[in-house]
Amino acid sequence: MIVPYQKNYQKIVMGLLSFQPDLHDYQRLQKELDWAVEARQTEILLWKDQNVDQFSAVMILQEGVDYILVRRVSFSPSERSGHSMYQFLSAVAKRYPERRMMGTLATQPLITNWQRNNYYERQTHEEHSE
């Protein structure tokens, strides 16, 4: 389930973002979060696992006119399965149905794999429904 960022989630977001190799340094991590909170057309979303009732991922998005750019995405180590990541991306895509989801150099491989997975699932579903 997607949960929009609130100030009282700051430590959770920082904890999840700290799994990113380039954000191990506290000062760098704080700058990244400050930028995301203050920047226009930027949104921070958390992913809450309803089965365990805890946050397991964070995504920083930058909104364009016809696209959503996934700038950062970070999952807790226990949630790095393709299924959890794809669920989060699918929920974000449903949140922005009129916009194309894109990634940075770091996040595009995940976006591409998610798109490929969706394509294959649709093809399989269409084959079984004929």
Image (cartoon, rainbow, N blue to C red):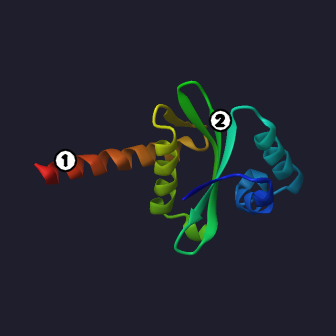
Question: Which one is in front, 24 or 66?
Answer: 66
Q: Which residue lies at the image location 50% right of the left edge and 61% below the top edge?
A: 84
For the residues labelled 1 and 2, the Cα–Cα distance comes to 33 Å
**Which three-letter amino acid code belongs to the residue tagged 2?**
Gln
Q: Which residue lies at the image location 76% right of the left edge and 42% below the top edge?
A: 36
Q: Residue 54's quadrant in the figure?
A: bottom right
Please determine whether, in this image, residue 58 is positioned above or below residue 95. Answer: below
Q: Is residue 129 visible to us here? A: yes
SS category of the residue bearing label 2: strand
Q: Which mark is residue 29?
A: none
Q: As drawn, which residue projects farthest toward the top? A: 65
Q: Which residue is mark 2?
A: 62
Q: As drawn, which residue projects farthest toward the left? A: 130
Question: Which one is in front, 84 or 19?
Answer: 84
Residue neighbourhood size for the residue with mark 1, other residues' Cα within 10 Å, grouped as few (<14), some (14–19), many (≥20): few
For marks 1 and 2, the one nearer the N-term is 2
Q: Could you say where residue 101 lies in the image, as x and y percent from the top left?
A: 51, 37
Q: Could you say where residue 95 lies in the image, as x and y percent from the top left?
A: 51, 43
Q: Could you say where residue 44 lies in the image, as x and y percent from the top left?
A: 68, 47
Q: Is residue 76 visible to us here? A: no
Q: Is residue 64 left or right of residue 124?
A: right
SS category of the residue bearing label 1: helix
Q: Which residue is mark 1?
A: 126
**Which three-letter amino acid code belongs to the residue tagged 1?**
Glu
Q: Which residue lies at the image location 15% right of the left edge and 54% below the top edge?
A: 128
Residue neighbourhood size for the residue with mark 2, other residues' Cα within 10 Å, grouped as few (<14), some (14–19), many (≥20): many
Q: How many marks?
A: 2
Q: Are marks 1 and 2 in contact (CB under 8 Å)?
A: no
Q: Could you say where residue 71 lies in the image, as x and y percent from the top left?
A: 65, 41
Q: Look at the image and tell me in which quarter the N terminus lies.
A: bottom right
Please determine whether, in this image, residue 101 is positioned above or below residue 83. Answer: above
Q: Which residue lies at the image location 15% right of the left edge and 49% below the top edge?
A: 127
